Amino acid sequence: MTKKSSLALWRKIHIYSFGYLKWPSIFVSVIFVLISITGILYNHTHDFEFLKKGRVTTSILPDSYQQRLDQTRQAQGLADLFPEEAASVPVMWLVKDLHTGDFFGPWGRIFYDLVGASLIILAVTGCYLFLKLHPSARTKRKGDS
C-alpha cells in the first residue's frame, strides 16, 4: 500500500467516524470530562473546603444513597444522633461515585472500563499514526544539517 493510498484510507475512516459516530463521540467526550473533573476534585480533597464539609441531599440522588447512608449510620451507632444529617451524604461520596462509575449502577463501572480502554486505543493509534504519517518527527530530513 502506498503512502498516498494509506492516507486516503485513513481519511475515509476519519470521515466515517466523525460523520456517523458524532453523537456517541460527543457522549463519550462528556464522560471523559466528568471523569477528569471528578478525578481532580478527588485528588484535591483537602484543598477545597466544600469537599471536606459539604453535603448533598439524598432527595436529588438515587435511592441507593439513602440506603447506604442508613446502613453506615446504623453500623456506626449514629442512627438516632445528628438527625439533620440523616437525609444528606458527604460531597466526597458523590465525587468518588461519579469518578468510579458507581453512580450509574452496576453497569457504570463496566461502561467506564470500556471508555478507559477506548482512550488507551485512541492514544496508541494516535501516536502510531503521527509517527507513521510524519516521519520527519522521528528523523531529520536528508537536506538538513
Image (cartoon, rainbow, N blue to C red):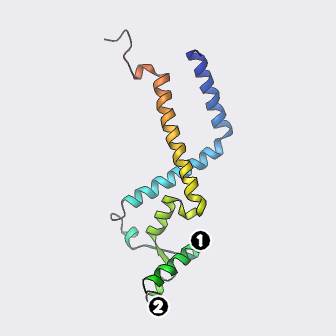
Q: Is residue 52 above or below residue 99?
A: below
Indicate the amino acid at tag 2: Asp
The residue lying furthest to the right in this view is 20
Q: Is residue 80 above or below residue 115?
A: below
Left or right: where 48 falls relative to 19: left
- Residue 66 at what x, y percent from top left? 55, 77
Q: What residue is rendered at 54% in x and 73% in y?
A: 65
Figure quadrant of the C terminus? top left
The residue lying furthest to the left in this view is 145
Question: How far apart, in angstroms, are the residues tagged by discs 2 and 1?
Answer: 23 Å
- Residue 136 at what x, y percent from top left? 42, 19
Residue on which disc 1 sits: 62
- Residue 63 at what x, y percent from top left? 60, 74
Left or right: where 8 falls relative to 45: right
Q: Earlier in the sequence, mark 2 or mark 1?
A: 1
Left or right: where 45 falls relative to 89: left
Q: Are marks 2 and 1 in contact (CB under 8 Å)?
A: no
Q: Nearer the viewer, residue 84 or 6?
A: 6
Q: Quadrant of residue 16?
A: top right
Total count of labels: 2
Q: What residue is rendered at 37% in x and 64% in y?
A: 45
Residue on which disc 2 sits: 80
Q: What residue is rendered at 46% in x and 52% in y?
A: 36
Secondary structure of the residue carrying numbered label 2 = loop
Q: Quadrant of residue 61?
A: bottom right
Secondary structure of the residue carrying numbered label 1 = loop
Circle 2: is it few (<14), some (14-19), or many (20+) Cα within 10 Å? few
Left or right: where 107 falls relative to 134: right
Indicate the amino acid at tag 1: Pro
Figure quadrant of the N terminus? top right
Q: Is residue 74 above or below residue 6?
A: below
